[in-house]
Amino acid sequence: SQRPSWNYRAQDGGGIVVDMFPHWEYVLHELFGRVTSVQALTATHIPRRWDEHGKPYDATADDAAYGVFELDGGAIAQINSSWAVRVNRDELVEFQVDGTEGSAVAGLRNCRVQHRGTTPKPVWNPDIPATEAFRAQWQEVPDNGEFDNGFKAQWELFLRHVYADAPYRWDLLAGARGVQLAELGLKSAAEGRRIAVPEITL
């Protein structure tokens, strides 16, 4: 892995929950709704790793997290995060969103959709090979515009806020929500239970 060795040491503050759950908080919050509960299971699948100098060390931080997030409005998100998995998908990260009227599979660059009206009805028979090309039944969403790097775009909005007092939605409260979800995710994993995520207010 190209990650620095401190990422894999719990005593150094590392771990995939601390790294990724703040990201999942704003992705879920911005797209679908506020996270109201979290249930997480963590694991250290590779307990022995090698540092930047080729020396082995004990990896004590979680390198995988399996999270279930309940959202305001009743939607449920299930997100697996891992530094110990081989990628077998079109993009490094992909999200499948299923709704009554259709579904979407969105990555960092591309998106495919399947509307309810065009969803075929496959017959599942475990005794014969699948005869349908399921991926071919989805439609690509066309790129109707050029999108800049997301982090760069957000920094530009922040600089406009600092320089010209322009509105800025991602304030300290948004950062606190990310830290809160990571802390509650670790608590959920340690205690083996679902934990409510209280709303943070000023």
Image (cartoon, rainbow, N blue to C red):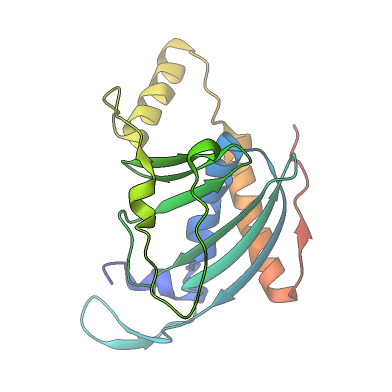
Position of 156 with respect to 175 (left or right) is left
- Residue lying at the far top in this picture: please name it: 164
Total marks drawn? 0
List x then y, in percent, for residue 83. 39, 70
**Residue 48 occupies quadrant:** bottom left
Residue nearest the observer in this picture, 101 or 176: 101
Q: Does 49 appear above or below 75? A: below
The residue under the point 50% across, 45% down is: 119
List x then y, in percent, for residue 79. 54, 59
List x then y, in percent, for residue 103. 52, 43
Quarter of the figure that contains the C terminus: top right
- Residue lying at the far left in this picture: please name it: 53
Position of 82 with respect to 53 (left or right) is right
Residue nearest the observer in this picture, 68 or 75: 75
Q: Does 161 appear above or below 104? A: above
The residue under the point 61% across, 39% down is: 29
The residue under the point 38% across, 74% down is: 129
Quarter of the figure that contains the N terminus: bottom left
List x then y, in percent, for residue 194. 76, 64
Residue nearest the observer in this picture, 136 or 165: 136
The residue under the point 47% across, 81% down is: 127
Position of 131 with respect to 197 (left or right) is left
